[in-house]
């Protein structure tokens, strides 16, 4: 009897978790934005595709010669400081604001080049209009230059499972406060 | 349907007729243009032909929008998309009240709300270059920026005391494109408001040596706008920040 009610509680708890995930996100969540992203697998997803997991999110463009590869490497260095079970909870979402050139095939190439864990990392592009809104939510500024390059700020943002901004950094290496927030986020409960 | 909503719907035609004139989309022909923004190189930029609304969006127009789109009403908008004082000059979520005339420009709107309003009109916010091109015109010429008298007129606006109620839209003369209130009434959101300064620019430097990077340094009225827009965040709801919408000339209406 006891064991059975335990199992029942487990089912109820997971039901409750599923229900709360499908509910409206909290008022300060960036998941309120209804944006459409196209991933490296050509899947159409929303900004909240990793809802339920702490997520590192940033913006880039694939043909960027130096700064963007550094940005991807920097996130990999931050996550390499986590132990394996904690890292397994983390998701990473890299959004390109250059949808014309960063096609799914190009994004998939980039993901392989950086050996990004396909289970946890998503590379995606967004329309001009959606990219502007995502950038606005993350405090990222970017401008397309006449030659086709982009002038943009490098900002790495940590979201909790509900899409609330927990921390952000403009330092590609050695931001200890950001690293600490990241550790705390992935060591907490799954939500 | 709640009776208040119903009432607001009934009132819509009255609000529309109370507006000074229909907020039409007017053509601004494309042009080679020397922007005041710092560019990688100092070439002119090419602005394609576009359409711009004849005056800033009014409280009456914005009331019609939130009546039809409940998620953009005060109290319903997520905090991440609009600050606490969103539509703070209105009496209620669907009531303008004495502090917000139907023909006054709507203010205390965030960038997200302004963008949503424009999307509902099958439009968008203008880009900075579009806004700057349209705002360079006087009543008689397309580029009045080198005219000292015109510049002085703009600067006089910035030195006027704040705190008075905003005038109604479209009270002054229209510029050569037929556009009202490009200067002198409210600041206006642009689509790329957060990308006007170089990514590493420190707004404080704007008044110092960093200003050397900005072209047309003597065009203070426009530079003040760039500095102000660059200091805003997308959820901010400033008391004199409004907007108007634009369309690309080749886009379907």
Image (tube, helix red, strand yellow):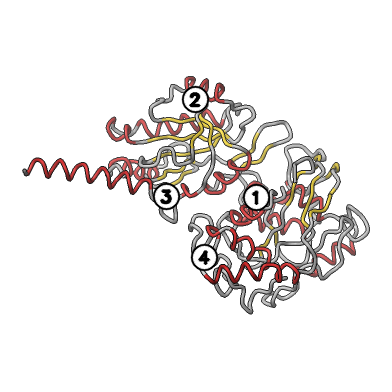
First-in-chain label (4 vs 1)? 4
Res B119 label: 1
Q: Which residue sits at x=61%, y=77%?
A: B97
In percent of width and height, residue A175 lies at: 42, 42
For label 1, the SS is helix
Marks 1/3: CA–CA distance: 26 Å
**Pointer 1 and pointer 2 on the same chain:** no
Q: Is label 1 or label 2 in front?
A: 1
**Pointer 4 and pointer 1 on the same chain:** yes
* Residue at the far left in the pictured view: A1
Marks 4/3: CA–CA distance: 33 Å
Q: Is label 2 or label 3 in front?
A: 2
Is B13 located above or below residue B203 in the figure? Answer: below
Q: Which residue sits at x=72%, y=57%?
A: B244
Mark 1 crowdedness (10 Å alpha carbons): few <14, some 14-19, many ≥20: some
Chain letter of disc 1 in the image: B
Res B1 label: 4
For label 4, the SS is loop
In percent of width and height, residue B127 lies at: 71, 47
Marks 4/2: CA–CA distance: 44 Å
Res A41 label: 2
Mark 4 crowdedness (10 Å alpha carbons): few <14, some 14-19, many ≥20: few
For label 2, the SS is loop
Marks 4/1: CA–CA distance: 25 Å
Chain letter of disc 4 in the image: B
Q: Name the residue carrying label 3.
A: A164
First-in-chain label (2 vs 3)? 2
Looking at the picture, tell me which residue is in the foreground, A125 or A6.
Answer: A6
In percent of width and height, residue B86 lies at: 56, 65
Direction from residue B89 to residue B55 in the image, left or right: right
Q: Which residue sits at x=54%, y=60%?
A: B70
**Pointer 4 and pointer 3 on the same chain:** no
């Amino acid at each position: 009897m006891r064991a059975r009610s335990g199992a029942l509680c487990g089912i109820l708890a997971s039901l409750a978790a599923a229900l709360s995930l499908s509910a409206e996100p909290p008022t300060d969540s960036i998941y309120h934005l209804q944006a459409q992203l196209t991933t490296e697998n050509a899947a159409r997803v929303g900004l909240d595709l990793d809802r339920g997991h702490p997520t590192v999110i940033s913006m880039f463009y694939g043909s960027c010669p130096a700064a963007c590869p550094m940005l991807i490497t920097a996130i990999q260095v931050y996550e390499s400081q986590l132990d394996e079970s904690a890292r397994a909870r983390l998701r990473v979402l890299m959004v390109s604001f250059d949808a014309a050139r960063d096609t799914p095939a190009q994004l998939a190439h980039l993901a392989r080049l950086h050996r990004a864990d396909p289970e946890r990392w998503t590379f995606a592009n967004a329309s001009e209009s959606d990219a502007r809104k995502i950038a606005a939510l993350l405090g990222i500024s970017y401008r397309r230059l006449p030659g086709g390059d982009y002038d943009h700020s490098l900002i790495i943002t940590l979201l909790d499972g509900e899409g609330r901004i927990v921390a952000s950094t403009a330092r590609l290496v050695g931001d200890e406060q950001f690293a600490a927030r990241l550790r705390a986020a992935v060591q907490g409960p799954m939500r | 349907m709640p009776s208040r909503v119903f009432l607001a719907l009934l009132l819509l035609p009255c609000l529309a007729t109370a507006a000074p004139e229909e907020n039409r989309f007017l053509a601004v022909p494309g042009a080679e243009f020397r922007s005041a923004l710092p560019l990688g190189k100092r070439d002119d930029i090419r602005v394609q032909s576009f359409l711009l609304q004849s005056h800033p969006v009014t409280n009456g127009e914005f009331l019609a929008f939130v009546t039809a789109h409940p998620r953009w009403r005060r109290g319903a908008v997520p905090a991440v998309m609009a600050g606490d004082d969103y539509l703070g000059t209105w009496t209620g979520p669907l009531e303008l009240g004495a502090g917000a005339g139907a023909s006054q420009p709507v203010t205390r709107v965030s960038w997200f709300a302004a963008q949503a309003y424009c999307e509902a009109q099958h439009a968008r916010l203008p880009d900075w270059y579009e806004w700057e091109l349209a705002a360079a015109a006087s009543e008689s010429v397309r580029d009045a920026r080198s005219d000292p008298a015109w510049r002085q007129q703009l600067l006089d606006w910035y030195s006027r005391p704040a705190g008075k109620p905003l005038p109604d839209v479209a009270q002054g003369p229209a510029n050569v494109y037929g556009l009202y209130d490009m200067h002198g009434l409210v600041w206006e959101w642009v689509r790329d408001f957060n990308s006007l300064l170089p990514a590493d620019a420190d707004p404080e430097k704007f008044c110092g040596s960093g200003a050397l990077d900005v072209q047309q340094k003597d065009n203070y009225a426009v530079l003040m706008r760039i500095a102000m827009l660059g200091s805003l965040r997308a959820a901010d709801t400033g008391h004199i920040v409004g907007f108007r919408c634009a369309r690309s000339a080749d886009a379907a209406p």
